[in-house]
Image: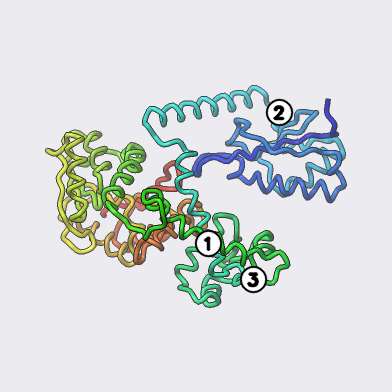
Amino acid sequence: MEPFRHHIFVCTQEKPEGVTCCPASGSMSVLGALHRELGSQGLSGDVQVSSCGCLGLCDDGPIMITYPEGVWYRKVKAEDVPEIVSSHLRGGKVVSRLEWNDPPAMKAAATEHTNHYLAMVKAKDEAGTLPDNLFEMTRSFMPSRALLTALELDLFTAIGPGASAEQASKKIHADARATEMLLNALASLKLLEKRDGIFFNTTACARFFAAGSRDNAQPGLLHIAHIWHGWSTLTECVRAGTSVERREEDWTRDFIAAMDHNAKDRAGAVVKAVGTNGIKRMLDLGGGSGAYSIAFARAVPGLKSEILDLGDVVPLTQQYIRQADLSDRITTRVGDMLRDPLGENYDLVTILAICHMFSPEENRQLFKRAYGALAPKGQLVVQDFILEPAKTAPRAAALFSLNMLVNTRAGASYSEPEYANWLREAGFSEVRRVRLPGPGGLMIGVRS
């Protein structure tokens, strides 16, 4: 039994960044366009629209199914919706250019997708990788903090009908660079839109967060910002049973342990992407726990790696190396990669999850120093969050840029064009980007 003339399902299953899914291809825009078009054509009462989970055909999304006919549409765009509503839902004629009517191929694609997904889940489970939902939960404060800061600065009012980062920074009396990082992060959260370098409020944000709107909730929401500062001391409060001043203990040890967990998760993919041919000597700048050196040493028999890191880190690095039983092949050296001699004639120099801590100029100089440390045809491999040119995606990278704002002197997430330019300026050729699952990736250059 079907109480409506038509019932439409649109996949809105969110998946981790870097994994193909219908929302990443624009299914939310399709869903919104569908509601608007049904209303404008007077069909809202005749057509039921439902969002749904994964339909197993992610590479061909967004996917839309219409019942009772059971017609599957694939790669639907918002601009296709008026034709679907008028031709199919009103006129009864299927839009053939969007229809997917090949059951064997559809079944094969869905089966392949399911098997691939189950294999990925099994591999992650066997590797002891933290489940995506738990990992996201540990970082869910970042979007909240970005929004609360925007409210404290009254940034949505400053954006008004549209403003550049520099214009907005002057209105809120803030640093232009930092303001742009915050605006890019807010755009990644779909709280702002960015077009040709100008930021615009979404309809909802203009209504609820900007001064002058009848429904402006910004003044009341500032109370939540005040609460947030108290919550940042929750761990100490639980220990003490009362409000306490914030203290940070064992920061370096805990930081290196966290980075080791992250690096182990990525190390296999990095080794595979870089390859192992011709690598005999490796310099691991800021190697931390040594996870990447350990991975390369295990993949390349006879490889010798040297890790350069700060004095409070190296004793911890040596513990990880001993645990891996690789003390004979991986050595450590205390030093500052921005200032101290790096050495020479390495086949591979790695700067992995480091560049976000430095300013653009520091990264330029570091890449030049790395070039000088390489043998001819040696490779420099940079692993980090890599932003798209507009710097509003991936979302995790845009938010991480704010993390660098509050934790470093001049660090940030950087874009692919920035990394590519710095590498070429340093003299590297064959510059390329290698995409890895998730928001991170590699930039690779070869010494001429």
- Comparing 217 with 372, the one in front is 217
Task: Give, as a three-letter code, the residue at label 3.
Answer: Gly
Q: Residue furthest top?
A: 104
- Comparing 338 with 93, the one in front is 338
Contact? badges 2 and 3 (CB < 8 Å): no
The crowding category of the residue bearing disc 3, from other C-alpha atoms within 10 Å (few below 14, some 14 to 19, many at least 20), is: some
- Of the 4 image quadrants, the one containing the C terminus is bottom left
58 shown above or below 393: above
The residue mark sitting in front, 1 or 3, is 1
Q: CA distance from mark 1 to mark 3?
A: 22 Å
Q: Residue furthest left?
A: 328
* Mark identifier at residue 160: 3
Which residue: 55% across, 73% down?
168
N-terminal label among 1 and 3: 3
Q: CA distance from mark 2 to mark 3?
A: 47 Å
Which residue: 54% across, 26% down?
114
Tag 2 residue: 101
262 shown above or below 405: above
- Is residue 358 found left or right of 105 in the rendered image? left
Residue 182: percent from left, percent from top = 50, 63
Which residue: 37% across, 60% down?
245
- Of the 4 image quadrants, the one containing the N terminus is top right
Task: Give, as a three-letter code, the residue at label 1.
Answer: Ala
N-terminal label among 2 and 3: 2
Task: Give, as a three-letter code, the residue at label 2.
Answer: Asn
- Comparing 281 with 432, the one in front is 281
Tag 1 residue: 225
